[in-house]
Image: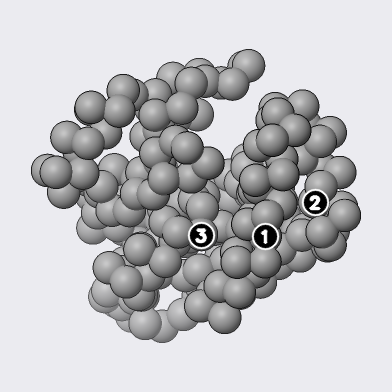
């Protein structure tokens, strides 16, 4: 039996733990590839070019947009982010699942272009907990944290456009739920390309 690849799109507010969940999911399930985004921001401590992101200049990003090389792109907190179209389409065609971990603006663009994708919203347990997480990770300035918290209400309004929601209250529970979603989707008949009875 062979099946079509599935596009899984995971997003949610900044600091909700999307990256941590993604790493845990990828380490526990086979046959799914993570798309590496392009960004114009500078690398944070410990981030590796081509592994965490493709770090590129603004003019190179603009060229990719002009050439329609991005499945989605957005300006988030003064920087540009995007998903290379070729990686996603090539893997889906080969029957590989692809996991995108992107912001909500980007997820809405992908939903417009590829509504057959599976959209998972990672939600915070509450605003105060999200503020504490953003402060604790030590990656953002006070101004950046305020900017991110100001966007939460707008981001939460988009929950209705997703197929699933997972509250990241306890990391292990959130990871288990995302793994369950992937497993259940893989069992759906609509993804079967051909089935041979032995």
Residue 87 lies, in percent from the top left, at: 28, 44
Q: Is residue 77 above or below residue 168?
A: above
Q: Nearer the viewer, residue 2 or 35?
A: 35
How many residues crowd mark 3 within 10 Å: few (<14), some (14–19), many (20+)? Answer: many
Residue occupying the point 35% across, 63% down: 109
Residue 157 visible, this angle: yes
Mark 3 secondary-structure assignment? helix
Residue occupying the point 62% across, 17% down: 46
How many residues crowd mark 2 within 10 Å: few (<14), some (14–19), many (20+)? Answer: many
Residue for badge 1: 152
Residue 184 lies, in percent from the top left, at: 57, 74
Residue occupying the point 51% across, 53% down: 103
Q: Is residue 116 above or below residue 72?
A: below
Q: CA distance from mark 3 to mark 1?
A: 11 Å
Residue 74 lies, in percent from the top left, at: 39, 49
Query: What quarter of the picture does the N terminus occupy?
Result: bottom left
Question: Which of pointers 3 and 2 lies earlier in the amino acid sequence?
Answer: 3
Q: Nearer the viewer, residue 171 or 127?
A: 127
Residue for badge 2: 130
Residue for badge 3: 104
Mark 2 secondary-structure assignment? helix
């Amino acid at each position: 039996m062979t099946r079509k690849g599935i596009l899984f799109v995971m997003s949610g507010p900044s600091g909700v733990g999307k990256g941590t969940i993604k790493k845990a999911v990828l380490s526990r399930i086979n046959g799914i590839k993570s798309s590496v985004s392009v960004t114009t921001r500078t690398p944070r401590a410990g981030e590796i070019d081509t592994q965490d992101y493709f770090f590129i200049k603004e003019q190179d990003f603009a060229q990719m947009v002009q050439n329609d090389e991005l499945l989605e792109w957005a300006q988030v907190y003064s920087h540009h982010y995007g998903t290379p179209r070729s990686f996603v389409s090539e893997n889906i065609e080969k029957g590989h699942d692809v996991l995108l971990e992107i912001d909500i603006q980007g997820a809405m663009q992908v939903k417009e272009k590829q509504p057959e994708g599976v959209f998972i919203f990672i939600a915070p347990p509450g605003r105060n907990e999200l503020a504490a997480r953003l402060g604790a990770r030590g990656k953002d300035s006070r101004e950046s944290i305020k900017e991110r918290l100001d966007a939460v209400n707008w981001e939460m309004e988009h929950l209705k456009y997703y197929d699933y929601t997972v509250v990241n209250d306890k990391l292990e529970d959130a990871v288990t739920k995302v793994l369950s979603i992937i497993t259940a989707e893989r069992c759906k008949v609509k993804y079967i390309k051909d089935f041979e009875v032995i």
